[in-house]
Image (cartoon, helix red, strand yellow):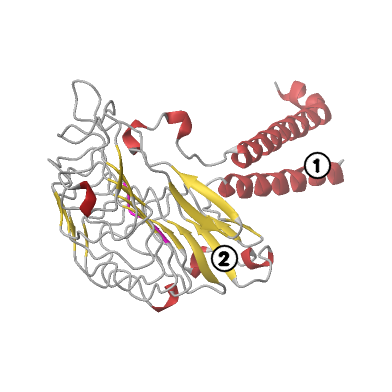
């Protein structure tokens, strides 16, 4: 009987230890590593570095030249350290708390091709902010608080093809556009003027601004310009006072709504889709204001593993209770004669 009781006590200790370990796992920040992707979204991370990854992370990463890193919807306030074992080509930092880009973008970002900084708290873009990103082709800075962009802010991005600056607070756009830039989204910025009149793009979105006219535009080559939602009549495909002097192709939606009726809240629509090219897959993003995204569309963390662990912990707890009850009952059955004798 003594051996049986000792066995129960040992089992009880082991199950309790396992239960505590499983309960602790619920609160451990864990990134998912698979093939050429590291997914660390919605984990309440305040910073990221190589030390943030588990030791066995690289066992799940197939050997290759490039890596995609998702740090979406965290609490990150500064540009992360990308000094990883494999060069990062795709980086998603949307829905974080980054305010300042100065002195953060350094040597290890040379291989970046796609960078998403939308839905952060950036207020300005200074010269050299993206220094070293010589291979960057797609940059999303939408839904920030940007009001000032230096003239040479994007000049070193010699391969940039797509730039999204929608849903900011830019009143005058004076930055030089890189030579290879094809898509520029400036919609919903309360823009009053563009200091750069030599536009050479495939598409330029100027919807929902305070532009009284766009006669200042002088497209170097035929550019699709979207001009709906400005305080001038563009119902007849606005071409300016001297249409022969420009090669722009203006497209106007006279019925476009820029804000919700009776409010100043922007409407979640975009005339131009910003397209990013990653490998052979084309991914299209629509510019949206985060305050108007339905709750069921917001990115959420997959809680299935947490519920699984909680279920296992519950089962172990039930076994612990049953085990303790069996031990007490066995002791009571063995010693009931003495208990009744001394009562």
Q: Is residue 333 left or right of residue 192?
A: right
Q: Which mark is residue 67?
A: 2
Q: Is residue 339 left or right of residue 205?
A: right
Total labels drawn: 2
User: Which residue is the extreme one toward the bottom?
Assistant: 107
- The spot of residue 113 in percent (x, y) is 47, 65
Corner quadrant of residue 148? bottom left
Is disc 1 placed on a helix, strand or loop?
helix
Residue drawn 21% across and 44% down? 189
Corner quadrant of residue 325? top right
Question: In the rendered image of this protein, does residue 209 appear above or below residue 280?
Answer: above
> In which quadrant is the N terminus drawn?
top right
| Residue 305 inside the magenta-drawn segment | no
Give the magenta part as a residue range: 138-142
Q: Is residue 280 left or right of residue 76?
A: right
- The one nearer the camera, 280 or 219, is 219
Local crowd at mark 2 within 10 Å, few (<14), some, or many (≥20)? many
Q: Which residue is mark 1?
A: 5
Which callout, 1 or 2, points at the residue further toward the start of the chain? 1
Residue drawn 64% across and 67% down? 58
Residue drawn 18% across and 20% down? 262
- Say which of marks 1 and 2 sits in front: 2
- The one nearer the camera, 128 or 275, is 275
- The spot of residue 286 in percent (x, y) is 42, 41
> In which quadrant is the C terminus drawn?
top right
**Label 1, label 2: how many angstroms apart (C-alpha)?**
55 Å
């Amino acid at each position: 009987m003594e051996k049986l009781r000792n066995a129960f006590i040992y089992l009880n200790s082991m199950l309790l230890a396992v239960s505590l370990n499983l309960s602790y796992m619920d609160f451990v920040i864990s990134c998912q590593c698979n093939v050429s992707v590291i997914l660390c979204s919605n984990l309440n991370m305040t910073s990221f570095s190589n030390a943030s990854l588990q030791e066995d992370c690289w066992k799940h990463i197939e050997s290759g030249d490039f890596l995609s890193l998702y740090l979406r919807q965290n609490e990150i306030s500064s540009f992360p350290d990308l000094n990883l074992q494999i060069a990062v080509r795709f980086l998603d930092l949307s829905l974080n708390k980054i305010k300042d880009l100065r002195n953060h973008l350094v040597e290890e970002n040379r291989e970046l091709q796609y960078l998403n900084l939308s839905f952060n708290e950036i207020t300005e873009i200074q010269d050299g902010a993206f220094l070293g990103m010589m291979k960057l082709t797609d940059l999303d800075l939408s839904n920030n608080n940007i009001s000032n962009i230096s003239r040479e802010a994007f000049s070193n991005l010699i391969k940039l093809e797509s730039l999204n600056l929608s849903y900011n607070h830019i009143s005058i756009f004076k930055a030089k556009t890189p030579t290879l830039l094809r898509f520029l989204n400036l919609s919903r910025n309360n823009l009053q003027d563009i200091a750069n009149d030599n536009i050479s793009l495939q598409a330029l979105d100027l919807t929902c601004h305070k532009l009284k006219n766009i006669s200042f535009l002088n497209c170097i080559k035929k550019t699709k310009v979207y001009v709906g939602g400005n305080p001038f009549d563009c119902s007849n495909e606005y071409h300016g006072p001297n249409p022969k002097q420009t090669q722009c192709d203006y497209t106007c939606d006279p019925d476009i709504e820029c804000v919700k009726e009776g409010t100043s809240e922007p409407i979640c629509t975009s005339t131009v889709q910003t397209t990013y090219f990653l490998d052979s897959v084309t991914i299209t993003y629509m510019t949206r204001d985060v305050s108007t995204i339905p709750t069921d569309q917001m990115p959420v963390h997959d809680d299935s593993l947490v519920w699984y662990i909680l279920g296992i912990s519950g089962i172990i707890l039930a076994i612990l209770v049953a085990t303790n009850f069996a031990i007490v009952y066995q002791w009571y059955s063995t010693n009931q004669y003495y208990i009744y004798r001394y009562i």
